[in-house]
Image (cartoon, helix red, strand yellow):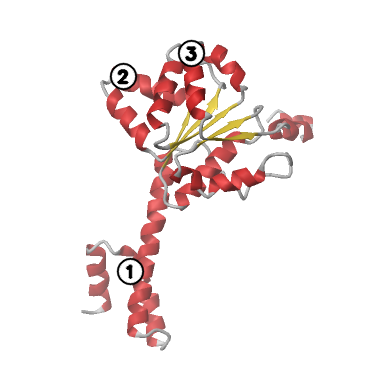
């Protein structure tokens, strides 16, 4: 079997990582840099790396992050120096997922809650976890659509299983009257089974009025805060700071 035939055979076996690395690895082997076992080992490693990269790409796509490229590396920790950086990086390790703990990010708009939530989501994906990101109003809308389509049970089962559910921007938009009960059911199903990271620009004392159901909100917070890591973001708004630093004509863009 020549190189061309071997390449075709590898691709037929769905070993595209090995196929793409075959030629450069053969060059290394012929140059005397690889023994037979090393040649085979590196090809297998190339295949595993390729599959791992594809899995990460697939999980990032499936997560449905709103913003592309939000990472901890490009977050400006110096702008709000009092934020608990150690907590953020601890969450990024993913250890809280193995213990089915939750996280709550609270603070004014523009303080980086959504950036950090998505960055942590990406970080734990790199460590092998699956993540689902939804803005609060989108999650409620999807559940309502599932009810209309007769898929409510299946939708909730999918939401219940994902290791990390990120519910972003609670309080940013007005929600329907059923939102409190819907969010409570989601939290109850996931409580002590899987982890939820929720961000809000409203203090928890306002959630009863915000969602219009004090009893449901109390029950939801009782579970969310039981095994929870709470991050107080801010106090300064990065977006407000950026607008104030722009020239008048730039601020209008």
Task: Find residue 247 and report its horizontal and vertical position in percent.
Answer: 79, 33
Q: Residue at x 59, y 39 (%)?
A: 115
Q: Which mark is residue 170?
A: none
Task: Find residue 126 and report its horizontal and vertical position in percent.
Answer: 47, 52
Q: Is residue 92 left or right of residue 134?
A: right
Quarter holding residue 2: bottom left
Q: Is residue 95 left or right of residue 248?
A: left
Which sits in the foreground, 204 or 32?
A: 204
Q: Are marks 3 and 2 in contact (CB under 8 Å)?
A: no
Task: Find residue 182 and report its horizontal and vertical position in percent.
Answer: 41, 20
Q: Which residue is mark 1?
A: 18
**On screen, 26 above or below 7?**
below
Give the CA separation, mark 3 to mark 2.
23 Å
> Which comes before the other along the chain, label 3 or label 2?
2
Foreground mark, 3 or 2, reads: 3
Q: Which mark is residue 215?
A: 3
Which sits in the foreground, 145 or 232?
A: 232
């Amino acid at each position: 079997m020549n190189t061309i035939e071997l390449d075709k055979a590898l691709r037929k076996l769905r070993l595209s990582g090995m196929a793409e690395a075959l030629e450069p690895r053969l060059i290394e082997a012929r140059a005397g840099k690889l023994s037979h076992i090393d040649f085979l080992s590196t090809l297998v490693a190339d295949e595993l790396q390729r599959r791992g990269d594809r899995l990460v790409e697939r999980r990032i796509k499936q997560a449905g992050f709103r913003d592309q490229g939000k990472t901890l590396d490009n977050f400006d920790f110096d702008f709000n120096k009092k934020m608990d950086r150690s907590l953020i990086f601890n969450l990024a390790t993913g250890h809280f997922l193995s213990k089915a703990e939750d996280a709550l990010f609270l603070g004014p708009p523009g303080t980086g809650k959504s950036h950090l939530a998505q960055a942590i989501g990406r970080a734990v994906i790199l460590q092998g976890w699956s993540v689902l990101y939804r803005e609060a109003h989108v999650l409620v809308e999807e559940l309502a659509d599932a009810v209309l389509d007769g898929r409510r049970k299946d939708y909730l089962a999918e939401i219940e299983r994902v290791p990390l559910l990120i519910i972003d921007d609670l309080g940013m938009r007005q929600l329907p009257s059923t939102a409190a009960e819907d969010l409570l059911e989601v939290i109850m199903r996931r409580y002590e089974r899987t982890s939820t990271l929720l961000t809000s620009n409203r203090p928890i004392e306002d959630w009863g009025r915000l969602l219009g159901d004090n009893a449901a909100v109390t029950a939801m917070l009782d579970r969310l805060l039981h095994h929870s890591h709470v991050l107080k973001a801010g106090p300064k708004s990065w977006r407000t700071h950026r607008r104030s630093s722009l020239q008048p004509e730039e601020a209008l863009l």
